[in-house]
Each structure stands twice: as structure tokens, then as C-alpha cells.
Image (spheres, helix red, strand yellow):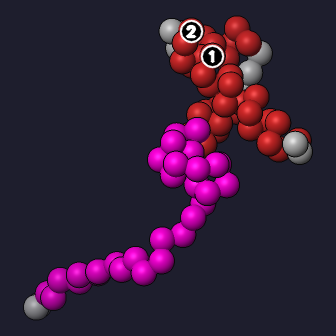
Amino acid sequence: MNNLQEKRERMLSMIADWQQSGKSKKAYCTENGIKEATFYYWFSRSKENESTGGNLSQSTRRQEGTMLRLSIPTVCV
């Protein structure tokens, strides 16, 4: 296992530990010496992981064929 995989597992384990602690994110970070920005980064990545149903690297998948419709109102002066 490489360092990135180990870090992911540690951070996801930390998120699970926080969820079971019942503490606020800020209190958990303070008590465990974790920077809040780091915690929030991994927390958001864990949510992306849940929504994609796969590993964290899949959270950056592109959606092919997505269309955008732009409406510009016509104004008569």
C-alpha cells in the first residue's frame, strides 16, 4: 500500500471516529491536534466518496454530454 492510500485510510478512520464521538468538528480537531482545514478537506472528500460509490479518485469523474442552456432576454429600448 502506498503513502496516499495509507493517509486516506487514516483520515477516513478519523472521520468515523469523529462521527461516533458526538463532538463538534471544531472540538474534535482541537482535542486531536488536527487543523480544521485539513479535517474539512477530508470530510468533504469522504462525502464525495459516498456519493460516487467508489474510491476517492473517482470523485473527479467528468460528466460527458452535459448541456447548458443560456437564455439572454431581448430588451427593446
| Residue that mark 2 sits on | 21
Coordinates of residue 2 in the picture (x, y in percent)? 89, 45
| Residue that mark 1 sits on | 17
Extreme residue in the bottom direction: 76
Amino acid on which the number 2 mark rests in the picture: Ser
Question: Which SS class for mark 2?
Answer: helix
- Residue at 60% over, 11% down: 27
Q: Quadrant of residue 43?
A: top right
* Residue 3 vertical position relative to residue 60 in the rendered view, above or below: above
* Residue 2 vertical position relative to residue 39 in the rendered view, above or below: below
Callouts 1 and 2 close, C-beta under 8 Å: yes
- Relative depth, front residue between 69 and 62: 62
Coordinates of residue 70 in the picture (x, y in percent)? 29, 81
Q: Which residues make up the magenta segment?
A: 46-75
Side of 2 relative to 52 (left or right): right
Extreme residue in the right direction: 2
